Image (cartoon, rainbow, N blue to C red):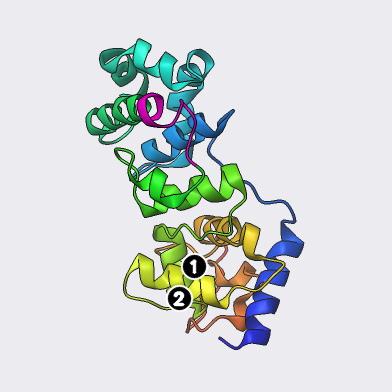
Amino acid sequence: MKKADVFEFYRRLAEANPHPETELESGNPYQLLVAVVLSAQATDAGVNKATRALFAAVTTPEQMVALGLDALKQHIRTIGLFNTKAKNVIALSQALIADHGSQVPDDRAGLERLPGVGRKTANVVLNVAFGAETFAVDTHIFRVGNRTGLARGKTPLAVELKLDKATPQPFRPHAHHWLILHGRYVCKARRPECWRCIVADLCAYKPKTPPPKAAPTPP
């Protein structure tokens, strides 16, 4: 995609949604970190449903450790892989207490040393909690980057690095959110809704999908 097209691509997404936000619910950086860890292979809506009662009672690593593994599992049992995720949440909470003064690190290396935290999770936390210009490549962004031609790559890291290189200011702080929301609601996996896409003319995907046929009107 040409530089001018990349700028216009983001300009349109920004005009349609000037203040994009993560759909994961949280009240502070610690809760955000927990929510993102829980969101792996799960929907944001499913995580939010499971964490509302949890986050009403737990706002700090100390409170999570005091809650305990079994009680945490009960809170998040509707989320996929909840047993492993619960162990990671307790372990990362203990690590925050022991190594970081109960504060969420604001650097990638510190985040990635925490149990259950990989590059994508670190990128989300850095972007949402600390305003870093990071690109957290999940399945939606991986698809949008490759399908549109905005940032093609065979791995999430390759797509991330190309997005980092291609995305201009003033769009960098919110680019991750625009792309994930576009992939979630418009550029869908099975059938992209090209007929209502505001960047369809800039996109390399062909053929464009037509709108669904209207049901026949009864006589």
In whole angstroms, how far apart are the C-alphas of marks 2 and 1?
A: 10 Å
Magenta range: 96-105
Q: Does 172 appear in magenta? A: no
The first of marks 2 and 1 along the sequence is 2
Residue at horizontal 40 percent and vertical 24 percent from the top: 97
Q: From what the image shows, is residue 158 above or below residue 25?
A: below
- The kind of residue tagged 1 is Pro
Residue at horizontal 53 percent and vertical 16 percent from the top: 56
Residue at horizontal 41 percent and vertical 57 percent from the top: 138
Q: Where is residue 162 drawn, in percent x and y? A: 47, 75
Secondary-structure class at tag 1: loop
> Which circle, 2 or 1, is nearer the viewer?
2
Task: Quickly name the residue at label 2.
Answer: 147
Residue at horizontal 43 percent and vertical 14 percent from the top: 63
Task: Quickly name the residue at label 1.
Answer: 192
Q: Main secondary structure of the magenta part?
A: loop
Q: Can you say which quadrant of the picture contains the N terminus?
A: bottom right
Q: Quadrant of residue 99?
A: top left
Q: How many marks?
A: 2
Q: Quadrant of residue 190?
A: bottom left
Query: Viewer-proximal residue, 72 or 168?
Result: 168
Secondary-structure class at tag 2: helix
- The kind of residue tagged 2 is Arg
Q: Where is residue 126 drawn, in percent x and y? A: 52, 48
The reply to whether the C-beta atoms of the residues labelled 2 and 1 are less than 8 Å apart is yes
Q: Where is residue 114 drawn, in percent x and y? A: 33, 39
